[in-house]
Image (cartoon, coloured by chain):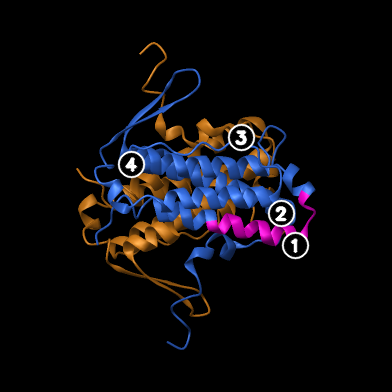
Chain colours: A blue, B orange
Amino acid sequence: MSFDIHAASAPVFVNSLKNMRAWLDKAAAEKPEAELLEARLAPDMRPLPAQYQMASDSAKNAVARLCGIEAPAMADNEVSFAELRERCDKTIAFIESIAPDAFAGSETREVKLLFPNGAGYRFAGRDYLTGFALPNFFFHATTAYAILRAAGVSLGKPDFLQHLGPPNINPED
Amino acid sequence: MSFDIHAASAPVFVNSLKNMRAWLDKAAAEKPEAELLEARLAPDMRPLPAQYQMASDSAKNAVARLCGIEAPAMADNEVSFAELRERCDKTIAFIESIAPDAFAGSETREVKLLFPNGAGYRFAGRDYLTGFALPNFFFHATTAYAILRAAGVSLGKPDFLQHLGPPNINPED
């Protein structure tokens, strides 16, 4: 199997959404949920739930636009960790429901990204993925992590890269 | 040109390193440099210069490992914005010095990532890029951004995605 746009998108989003889901468990064990749900990095930045919602949007819209299908609408009304976990799960389930074959031709598929004011960007699929979707997704995933870290949750880089699993090279090898 | 591992790596790193360089100019115009050089998100997280250094390392090591060449050593001794700009520039120059052809075969090239204790990961190049190099790079780029935002610098999403340039769809289209 050669490098393809499915491998560079769907599992990347799914891996990080699973990591993000797990951060909530660690956070809930260490700090009051109500405090973390209000936490943000700067007064004019969005709080934790919005970072989860925007990571979800970035991931589901990316695979949908690449495949030329509709992403399921999600209402951005999560107000608890349980609901944020469910948001991660629904997003993962949608992405995993799309067969790798559905990405055929997505490298060159025209993707339009429109803002509410009518301006936006027209991309080839591959440029949309590497220039917008991946950076924007990791922006929100990392901002969620940063909010939790700044609030005192004991996350570390292994939590950000939890999808790697345990090392497959050991010192005695 | 089809989607390839060069397009999914080298220009992605270069674009974000140029954005990161530009954040320093905005930051320097708004806040004392000495204060920002010490800024961090949590007491046990690394400060701003280390985030730039680790983003640089992640990018230069990624392209070097994919191509099976050596990345230039950089001493992690930057103590000013001028030196961080130079670090970005040197990293960008190294990445841009590698011809796209040098990425031939990198999808399946074995990449070993070893930690100081001798443990580590063995990947195929494509899995290294999508599972480690890109998430880790954007982790440090976003953490640098988050440190500046939390310190009161007026960055916004357009600064994170500055490489997109102005919209190419306009409301009157």
Front position among marks 4 and 2: 4
When the figure is inspected, residue A167 is found, relative to residue A80, above or below; the finding is below
Residue type, numbered disc 3: Ala
Between B169 and A71, the one lying in front of the other is: A71
Front position among marks 4 and 1: 4
In the picture as drawn, the residue positioned furthest to the bottom comes out as A172
**Residue at x 56% of width, y 40% of height:** A54
| CA distance separating discs 4 and 3 | 42 Å
Region rendered in magenta? A18-33
Between A84 and B120, the one lying in front of the other is: A84
Q: Which mark is residue B28?
A: 3
Q: Which residue is mark 1?
A: A29
In the picture as drawn, the residue positioned furthest to the top comes out as B172
Chain containing mark 4: A
Residue type, numbered disc 4: Cys
Front position among marks 2 and 1: 1
| CA distance separating discs 2 and 1 | 19 Å
Q: In this rendering, do the residues under marks 4 and 1 share a single chain?
A: yes
Residue type, numbered disc 2: Ala
Q: Which residue is mark 2?
A: B42
Q: Which residue is mark 4?
A: A67
Q: Secondary structure at mark 3?
A: helix
**Residue at x 46% of width, y 43% of height:** A60
Side of B150 where B49 appears, left or right: left
When the figure is inspected, residue A28 is found, relative to residue A119, above or below; the finding is below
Chain containing mark 2: B
Residue type, numbered disc 1: Ala
